Image: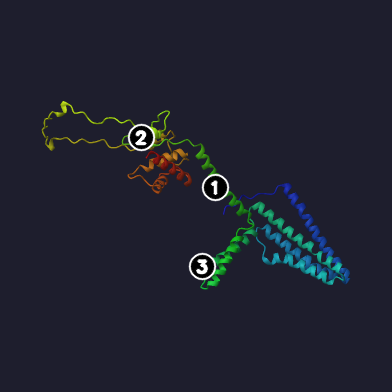
Amino acid sequence: MNRPPERSLSRGQAYVLGAAAVPMVAFGGMGAFGTYSNITSVFHRSATALGVVAAGEGATLVLALVLVGLTMLGQSAPVAVRVGLWTLPAVASLTGATVAQSTTEAVVFAVTPMAMCVSAEGMGLLARRIVVYRTGVDAEAQRRNAAVMQRLAYHRARAANHPDEKARNDSELESWKLAKKAGAGDALLGANLVEVQRGRLTDGADAALAGMFALPVTPVTPSAHGVTEAPEPLAVEGTDEEDVTPPMTDVTPRVTEEDTQVTPTLETVPPEDVTPVTLPPETPVTLEEIAAVAGVPTPVVGEPLSDEQLVVVLRHLRYTDDPPLSYRQAVTAFREAGFVGGEQRVRRAWGSLMSHEETDA
């Protein structure tokens, strides 16, 4: 997995985060002192009050420090630590509400321990965000996603292979519920998905602009001794192409007096006296010639090609064999020759080549 480079906190960021952590610790301590005062007013014994504070706010502080330490090490906190951060203050609140002598005191005694709970959660969240900012790794999100994916894999296998139809249906429904949770809260996953979509949008915009502003490629027709441009149809000024009718001419040949004369019979020459005539071999059309006719630089292997050069290369490869190569054969020859071009751009160039051939036909 590609991770972003580790970043360090600036001095200003460190000061601000430190200043934000101070009130959390201060208010947590104030909540513990309030619980101590509340219990002392009821039992009039300091030891009892300290025991209640240690069991509630003190234990919560220990779990908060464990959570912060594990987070700073890039590790996820166990379930017991996360549950304890809320259970212990809740027990302290229930204890305060129970020993209170009136309803008003019960409400105050129950609310006071929650200050330590909020402080612990705030410190843990702040430490987690610092680690994510510096390393780009969210251990807590990875833990949740790993658990979701493990359950998803189990239910998919159960839905496919379990002998009980009811169990298969239950796992099928459960797998869809788990699929909704996959990747939730993973900032790195979201950034990667945005990056992928940004690349696709860039390719789409490039294709649209290329189709709007690219110069048309002049179609070429391979011949036996070179490359010739496809002839353009003659246009008659002031008339439509459909209204132009070729003039009818008299094609009946005239019989002259010379045609009626008998041509003397030539003497047959024996086959052994005839010298065979060897025709010159056909010269294949080169890539340089096609590029010259199209008016583009000669494509070079290993270098990025323009859309016009892609059409030239595909045209050259298509007619290297008889019958002409198909799309898959031409793409295979394109890759084996070492030319560079993305799959989408090659497919667009092939479509342009085919459209020109249909127009010529």
Tags 2 and 3 in contact by the CB under 8 Å rule? Answer: no
How many neighbours does mark 2 have within 10 angstroms: few (below 14), some (14-19), or many (20 or more)? some
Left or right, 242 with respect to 68, comes to left
The percent coordinates of residue 206 (x first, y second) are 53, 42
Q: Which of 255 and 199 is in front in this view?
A: 255
Residue annotated with mark 2: 227
- Label placed on residue 296: none
How many neighbours does mark 1 have within 10 angstroms: few (below 14), some (14-19), or many (20 or more)? few
Q: Earlier in the sequence, mark 2 or mark 3?
A: 3
- Label placed on residue 200: 1
Residue annotated with mark 3: 160
Q: Earlier in the sequence, mark 3 or mark 1?
A: 3
Q: Which of 89 and 230 is in front in this view?
A: 230
Q: Which amino acid does label 3 sit on?
A: Ala
Q: Which amino acid does label 2 sit on?
A: Val
Real-space Cα separation, disc 2 to disc 3, in angstroms? 60 Å
The percent coordinates of residue 342 (x first, y second) are 48, 45
Residue in the picture at 44% in, 44% down:
351
The N terminus is located in which quarter? bottom right
Q: Earlier in the sequence, mark 1 or mark 2?
A: 1
Res 46 seen here: yes
Left or right, 225 with respect to 262, comes to right
Real-space Cα separation, disc 1 to disc 2, in angstroms? 38 Å
Identify the secondary structure beneath mark 3.
Answer: helix
